């Protein structure tokens, strides 16, 4: 017999459970089924077996998008972590107006992606942009950031680093939990700032670094908004392909979006989504398995 407390608990949690079932579990299950079908949202799905998955591994554009995405995962993730940690370290120093500085550095992370992209498209303008103008003053000719396929992804990495305020806030909270007694003991032993940072700060906040690393990898495996805006609005490629110059901005999530909502090939898009899920899961599992070599927990 079900207890009254159980029924009451289920009733109170039912809004969440119903929403979770309708808007999370059902779409996940539906995408798995559609990944084995030919479905365009206007006709009934037709079972095609593993054809969509064979298409994923044989299509040149998919491999191009995977290479572009891995580039961002490999370079943008560590840059974002390092910038966030450096900002947190600076803002952890007690100076007058500390809260104002923290607010100013955090604001870029809450600016919508569209506004951020528009601002950076102006900053990166090869003729009148802020960066190339500054480079001109020191005698360096700036690159054509958003039209040169060599520089499009570094430009996006800079955009990502500019919005590292969210990463900074979490690192800042972690830095404030580092016991001051450890620093005092290290100072008595004659340790300098770099030695204290490497031997005390980094090991103490290593669980937070692991968390930020996993979240950064997941974010860049699904990288979409900024690249979509830049590719669509900078005339750096066909609006239909959303790929940028020489497909340098064709990221996996953009190709998935194009297959699903431009070409209406939901079977291809669903198969791509599940392949991305498997890749992200494998990479995350590998990092967790190797984290015991460099992550120090409180009980260790």
Image: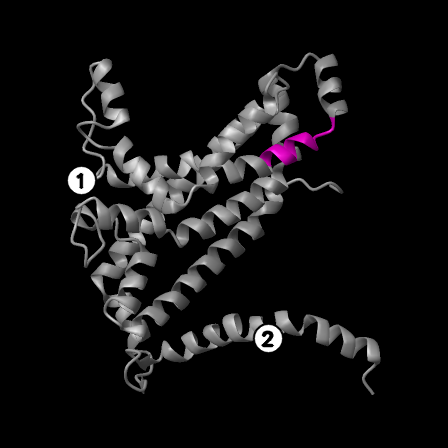
Provide residue 67's location: percent of width, then percent of height.
Answer: 29, 51
Q: Which residues are magenta?
A: 171-179
The residue that appears at 16% across and 48% down in the rendered structure is 246
2 or 1: tag closer to the N-terminus: 2
Residue for badge 1: 147
Labelled disc at residue 18: 2
**Of the pair 149 and 41, the residue shown nearer to us:** 41
- Classified by dominant secondary structure, the portion drawn in magenta counts as helix
Question: Relative to residue 50, is residue 194 depicted above or below?
Answer: above
The residue that appears at 23% across and 14% down in the rendered structure is 137
**Of the pair 123 and 224, the residue shown nearer to us:** 123
Q: Is residue 175 magenta?
A: yes
Question: Relative to residue 256, is residue 138 depicted above or below?
Answer: above
In the picture provided, is 230 more to the left or to the right than 104? left
**Of the pair 18 and 51, the residue shown nearer to us:** 18
Provide residue 163's location: percent of width, then percent of height.
Answer: 44, 37
């Amino acid at each position: 017999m079900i207890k009254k407390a159980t029924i009451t608990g289920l009733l109170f949690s039912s809004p969440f459970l119903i929403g979770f079932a309708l808007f999370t579990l059902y779409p996940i299950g539906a995408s798995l089924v559609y990944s084995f079908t030919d479905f365009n949202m206007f006709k009934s799905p037709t079972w095609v077996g593993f054809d969509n998955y064979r298409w994923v591994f044989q299509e040149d554009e998919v491999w191009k998008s995977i290479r572009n995405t891995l580039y961002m995962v490999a370079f943008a993730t560590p840059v974002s972590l390092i910038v966030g940690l450096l900002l947190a370290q600076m803002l952890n120093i007690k100076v007058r107006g500390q809260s104002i500085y923290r607010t100013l550095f955090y604001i870029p992370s809450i600016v919508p992606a569209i506004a951020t992209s528009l601002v950076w498209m102006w900053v990166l303008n090869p003729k009148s942009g802020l960066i190339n103008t500054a480079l001109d003053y020191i005698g360096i000719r700036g690159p054509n950031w958003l039209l040169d396929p060599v520089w499009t992804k570094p430009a996006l990495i800079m955009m990502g680093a500019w919005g590292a305020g969210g990463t900074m806030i979490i690192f800042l909270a972690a830095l404030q939990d580092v016991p001051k007694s450890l620093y005092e003991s290290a100072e008595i032993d004659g340790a300098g700032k770099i030695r204290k940072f490497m031997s005390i700060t980094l090991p103490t906040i290593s669980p937070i670094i692991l968390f930020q690393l996993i979240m950064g990898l997941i974010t860049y495996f699904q990288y979409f908004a900024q690249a979509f805006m830049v590719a669509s609005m900078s005339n750096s490629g066909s609006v239909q392909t959303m790929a940028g110059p020489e497909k340098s901005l064709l990221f996996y999530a953009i190709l998935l979006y194009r297959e699903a909502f431009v070409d209406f090939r939901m079977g291809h898009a669903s198969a791509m989504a599940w392949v991305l899920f498997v890749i992200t899961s494998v990479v995350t599992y590998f990092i967790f398995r190797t984290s015991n070599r460099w992550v120090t927990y409180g009980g260790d």
